[in-house]
Image: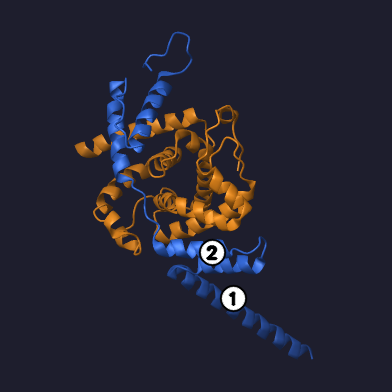
Amino acid sequence: MSQSRPARAEQPHVPDPDLDAVRAAQADRAAFAVLYRRYLDRVYGYAFYQLGDHHDAEDATERIFLAALRALGGFRDQGSTFRAWLFRIAHNTIANAHRSRARRRTVTLPEGWDRSAPDADPARLVGRGEELRELLALIAELPDDRRHVVLLRFVDELTSREIGIVLDRSEGAVRVLLHRALRELAARFAGDRLA
Amino acid sequence: MTLSPPQGNPVPILHTRAEQLDRAVDALLAGRPAPPPVDPGLRTLVDVAAALRGALLPVPAGSRLEARLAARLASRPALGDPIHAFGELARRELRSRNRLLVAGAVSSAAVGVGVTAYAVWHRSALRRS
C-alpha cells in the first residue's frame, strides 16, 4: 500500500467522529464491536456492488473486518478518518479478490439477485432489481477509477477527501473523476433513451 | 464561485465545475436541496447524481453475516496461529458448492497419485529384495 501523496498531507485536519470508538477498541479489542456494527452494512454494500455476488461479498467483508481488527493498533489520527482508513482496507481487499478471480467489472447483478440474499430485509430490495441492473450496467462500463469514486461517493457516502485517501489521489483529482463519471453516465443515459 | 477563474488563477475551469458539482453532491447526500450550480451545464449532472443517490441504496448485510462475523471477531486468536489460518482458509474455500467439488476432485487426485507412487515404490522395493 503506497503512502500519502504530498497534496493530501497539506489538507487541513478534519475531526474524526469515530475517534473515541477507535481509541476504545485500541485499548480493548471487544470495543471493536461498536465500529463493526456501525460500518458492517456500508462495507458489505461496497463489497457487493464491486463484486456482484452475495457469497463473495460476505467473504470479502469478513476479510476486511478481520484485517481492520488486526491493523487497528497502527491507526493514527493523522489526516485520515477511521472510515477512510477502513475503506482503504476494503478497496485493497476487493482489488485482491478481483485479481484472484481474474475478472473485472463485475458489478452487474446476477439473475435472481433479489432472492440471493435470503436474510436481507426484503422490503428494502423489492422492485429494485431492474432499476439497479440497468444502472449498474452503465456504472460497470466506467473506467475503474471513476467506478470506484461513484460507488464510494453514493453508496458509502464518503467525502471526496476521504475517497482521495482510499484511492491515494488528491481531493481535487477525486472531484474531477466524479465530474467525468457523471458526465459519462449522463451521456450514456441519453444514449439509452434515444436507442 | 464563478465559472471563469479570476485573472492569473491557474485553476482550470473543469476543476471549478468539479467543485460546484461536488458541493451539489454533498447537499444531496446530506438530504438538503442541491444548490443551483452557477454553470447551467451542470444541471444534467446534478440530475444524474440525484438518480444515483436514489438508486444506489445501501445493501443490508443480513443478520446471519452480522452474527457470524461478530463471533469471529470476538474469538479471533493471536496472530500467526497456523492451525487457525489453515482452518480459516479451508472454511472460506469450502463454503460454496463449486469450491467444494473442486476441493473434492483435487483431494481425490492427490490420494490417487499418492497410492500409485506408494505401489510403484513398494514393487521396486520387493524386486530389489
Q: With respect to residue A8, does A117 lie above or below?
A: below
Earlier-in-chain disc, 2 versus 1: 2
SS of the residue at dot 1? helix
Left or right: residue B80 versus residue B105 is: right
Label 2 belongs to which residue? B72
**Residue furthest right as drawn:** B129
Residue at horizontal 38 percent and vertical 14 percent from the top? B4
Query: Which three-letter amino acid code belongs to the residue tagged 1?
Result: Ala
Q: Disc 2 vs disc 1: Cβ atoms closer than 8 Å?
A: no
Kindly identify which chain the residue marked by label 1 belongs to.
Answer: B
SS of the residue at dot 2? helix
Could you say which chain is coloured orange in the image?
A: A
Q: Is residue A170 visible?
A: yes
Label 1 belongs to which residue? B110
Given residues B128 and A110, the one toward you in this image is A110
Looking at the rendered image, the quarter that the N terminus of chain A falls into is top right
Q: With respect to residue B47, does A22 lie above or below?
A: below
Could you say which chain is coloured blue in the image?
A: B
Marks 2 and 1, how far apart in space?
31 Å
State the image coordinates of residue A192 (x, y, percent, origin top left).
24, 39
